[in-house]
Image (cartoon, helix red, strand yellow):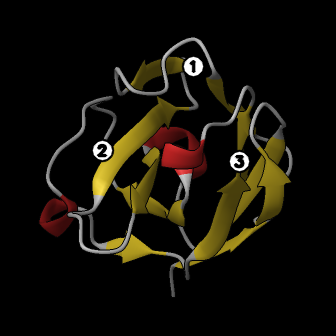
C-alpha cells in the first residue's frame, strides 16, 4: 500500500519559519512526483511545490516562490517543505501528494492518486 505521512505543522508568527515533512512508502521514490498542496477555508486546494527526486526538478506556485523550498531525502523516502517568511495568507491545511510519474507539474488534485493526511499551518499576525 502507498502511504504518505505528513507532519510538522503548527502555529507561527508572521515572518517565521516552519518545516513540513512527508514520509513516503510503497512507491518507487525516485520515479514519482511528490507535491505539497494547501487548502484554506472556503478556497480550493492549490499546488504549492512539486519535486521529482530522481533529478531534483522542482516547481513552485508564484505565491510561495522565493520563500518556500521543497527538497527530498532519498535515503529516508521523505520530502520536506521549508517555509520561510511566512505570511498570514499561508494559513491552510497542507497536504502532501504523490503521482507515479516524473512530470514536475501541478496537475489538478484529482490527478494525484495518493495523499497524506493534512497538517495545519497557522500564521498569526
Q: Which comes sooner in the sequence, label 3 or label 1?
A: 1
Q: Which comes sooner in the sequence, label 2 or label 1?
A: 1
- Discs 3, 2 touching: Cβ within 8 Å: no
Label 3 element class = loop
- The reply to whether residue 108 is in sight is yes
In the rendered view, would you say 83 is above or below 120? above
In the rendered view, would you say 59 is above or below 97? above
In the rendered view, would you say 34 is above or below 112? above
Residue lying at 81% horizontally and 64% vertically, measured from the top left: 11
Distance CA(mark 2)–CA(mark 1):
14 Å
Mark closer to the observer (3, 1): 3
Q: Which residue is mark 3?
A: 125
As rendered, which of 27 and 62 lies closer to the eye?
A: 62
Q: For the view shown, which residue lies furthest in the top direction?
A: 66
The percent coordinates of residue 105 (x first, y second) are 25, 31
Residue lying at 82% horizontally and 46% vertically, measured from the top left: 18
Q: Which residue is mark 2?
A: 101
Residue lying at 78% horizontally and 30% vertically, measured from the top left: 15
The percent coordinates of residue 97 (x first, y second) are 43, 62
Q: For the view shown, which residue lies furthest in the bottom direction?
A: 1
Mark closer to the observer (3, 2): 3
As rendered, which of 105 and 18 lies closer to the eye?
A: 18
The percent coordinates of residue 111 (x first, y second) are 15, 61
As rendered, which of 28 and 22 lies closer to the eye?
A: 22
67 relative to 93 in the view: left or right: right
Label tally: 3
Mark 2 neighbour class, 10 Å CA radius: few under 14, some 14 to 19, many 20 or more: few
Q: Which residue is mark 1?
A: 56
Amino acid at each position: 500500500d502507498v502511504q504518505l505521512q505528513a507532519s510538522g505543522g503548527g502555529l507561527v508568527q508572521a515572518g517565521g519559519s516552519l518545516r513540513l515533512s512527508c514520509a513516503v512508502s510503497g512507491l518507487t521514490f525516485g520515479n514519482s512526483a511528490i507535491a505539497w498542496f494547501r487548502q484554506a477555508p472556503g478556497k480550493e486546494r492549490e499546488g504549492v511545490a512539486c519535486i521529482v527526486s530522481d533529478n531534483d526538478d522542482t516547481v513552485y506556485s508564484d505565491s510561495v516562490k522565493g520563500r518556500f523550498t521543497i527538497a527530498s531525502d532519498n535515503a529516508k523516502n521523505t520530502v520536506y517543505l521549508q517555509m520561510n517568511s511566512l505570511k498570514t495568507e499561508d494559513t491552510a491545511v497542507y497536504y502532501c501528494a504523490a503521482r507515479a510519474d516524473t512530470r514536475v507539474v501541478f496537475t489538478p488534485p484529482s490527478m494525484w492518486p495518493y495523499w497524506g493526511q493534512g497538517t495545519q499551518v497557522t500564521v498569526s499576525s
